[in-house]
Amino acid sequence: MNALRDAFGLMLLDHLEGRPAVEIIERDDGFVQVFTGSPAGYFAPVRRWHAPERRALRLVRGRVLDVGCGAGRVALELQRRGHDVVAIDPSPLAVEVSRRRGVADARVLGLRDVDDGLGRLETVVLFGNNFGLLGDARKARARLRRLHAVTSPGARILASSGDPHATRDPVHRAYLDRNVQRGRLAGQIRFRVRHRRAATPYFDFLFVSRDEMAQLAGAGGWRLTGTVDSEKA
């Protein structure tokens, strides 16, 4: 990946090396969200994670695939707890950051390219709303089936997402309604990440409700057995 297309990884690297780093999300309808704080959340120790993620850690079993590892916060915590972790991210600079922070097995790999070359896995982790990396309804079903093929019997996926239907913002509501009119899931967000002069290509990121997650899981060969809501955590 050209460095000027790896805006997410560049942001993480700048933060790691003490340079100013600001994350900018640019949606395909022109909506722009600027996160003015530093990207420290991607580096956060477990005590600073959202409560549902902390609780979900007790469900991790055996060998783990950390999907969309970013700066390695999840992989590092699971390594600390004694798990064998394969951390993957399509961003070369993110993988560099993870390795420099101590992730033992970090690989430049997208979810669509996961295959049995990774070896047998018992837990798949998609924290940080990374259920969204499944992309859209069609890709989600295919990618979940792919994960099913590389995991052992009884394996589990631990994934987080935000319910897009909960928003009351009229700009976001209009975007969700437009998605439905076009035959998409409401929470299929198409955006790119910007940082300094770099910008990723536009890509689809999927936010889902509990019922939508359950339907996609079933179509991909999985079964949703439980959820942890933030307000109940």
Image (tube, rainbow, N blue to C red):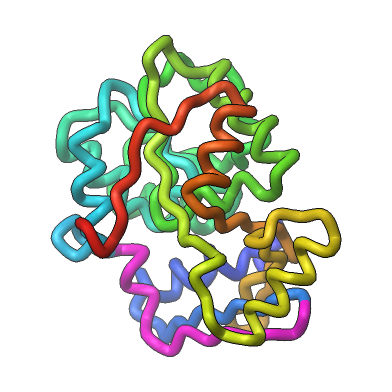
* Relative depth, front residue between 199 and 142: 142
Whether 156 is drawn above or below 9: the answer is: above
Residue 92 in sight from this viewpoint: no
35 is within the stretch colored magenta? yes
- Looking at the image, which residue is at 38% across and 26% down? 156
* Quadrant where the image shows the C terminus: bottom left
Q: Quadrant of residue 18?
A: bottom left
* Quadrant where the image shows the N terminus: bottom right
Q: Is residue 94 left or right of residue 41?
A: right
Magenta stretch, residue numbers: 29-43
166 is within the stretch colored magenta? no
- Residue furthest to the top in view is 153
The percent coordinates of residue 55 (x first, y second) are: 20, 46
- Looking at the image, which residue is at 77% across and 80% down? 29
* Relative depth, front residue between 49 and 116: 49
Whether 107 is drawn above or below 182: the answer is: above
- Looking at the image, which residue is at 48% across and 42% down? 67
